[in-house]
Amino acid sequence: MDLKEEDILGGDIGRHWYYRAKAAALRRMVAALRPQRLLDVGAGSGFFSRHLLANGAQSALCVDIGYEHDRDDSEAGKPVLYRRDCDATDCDLVLMMDVLEHVDDDAGLVRHYAARVPSGAHFLVTVPAFRLLWSGHDVFLEHKRRYTLGEIEQAMRTGGLEIVKGAYYFGLIFPLAAAVRLATRGDGTPRSSLKKHGALSNGLLAAACAAELPLFPMNRLAGLSAFVLARKP
């Protein structure tokens, strides 16, 4: 996840509509897998791993080159290990939450971690969707690209994985976000569009995302984020 966004939201990240909704969508995508051992690549604080640990997973290995040093922690008595890199592991679910848009060789990064997990392990990847939504928000977060579902699925296939399913999320708010970003397209000033909200606006946006959640796995039309679940053969 983006450390710059964590810096903006601080301790409010777990209450922010965007992260609450993304965590709920993640949980829905992997619910049938019942993952036990997580490898969270580009994990930052480990927000998404900790969410899954609170919902049945048993351990998390969080990897991020931004860590100053390795350390061990826990969540509800379950181990959470923070590392700058990892060797071979028996993790059964690899998370790459808003990671691949930051690297030059996205398929290469997928291949790098696919070599470290056993056959049958699953990958859950999220990336920002649609080049037409490119804005100063992407510049601020140092993105290199935005994706269609077809593009991110192809990158994962090139990285050696089999696609299980893919979908867009944040579809209900897509028209509003697209209108705002297209209206300000000429302004490429690097700045995040993520901000803290009051209780009312935060609640309304959270409600819109919750209403979309039951149909989310079938949405291959449009959204702000693309989710892809894949499997190592």
Image (cartoon, rainbow, N blue to C red):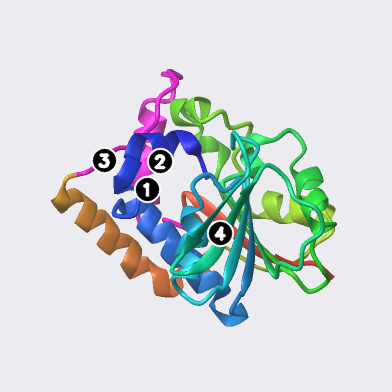
Task: Residue type at mark 3: give it.
Answer: Lys
SS of the residue under disc 4: strand
Considering only vertical position in the picture, is 171 above or below 198?
Answer: below
Q: Magenta stretch: dominant SS?
A: loop
Residue 178 circle label: 2
Residue at the spot 81% in from the left edge and 49% down from the top edge: 112
Residue 83 circle label: none
Q: Which residue is mark 4?
A: 80
Q: Is residue 171 visible?
A: no
Label 1: few (<14), some or many (≥20) within 10 Å?
Answer: some
Task: Check if mark 3's residue and mark 2's residue have beta carbons within 8 Å.
Answer: no
Distance (Cα) linking label 2 and label 4:
37 Å
Distance (Cα) linking label 4 and label 3:
28 Å
Label 2: few (<14), some or many (≥20) within 10 Å?
Answer: some
Give the label, 1 or 4, closer to the camera: 4
Task: Check if mark 2's residue and mark 4's residue have beta carbons within 8 Å.
Answer: no
Task: Check if mark 4's residue and mark 3's residue have beta carbons within 8 Å.
Answer: no
Q: In the rendering, at what x and y percent does residue 69 appear?
A: 62, 38
Task: Residue type at mark 1: give it.
Answer: Pro
Distance (Cα) linking label 3 and label 2:
20 Å
Among numbered discs 3 and 1, the one appearing first in the sequence: 1
Among numbered discs 4 and 3, the one appearing first in the sequence: 4
Q: Closer to the camera, 124 or 186?
A: 124
Q: Closer to the camera, 80 or 112?
A: 80
Which stretch is magenta? Answer: 168-197
Q: Which residue is mark 3?
A: 196
Q: Is residue 230 visible?
A: yes
Q: Which residue is mark 1?
A: 175
Among numbered discs 2 and 4, the one appearing first in the sequence: 4
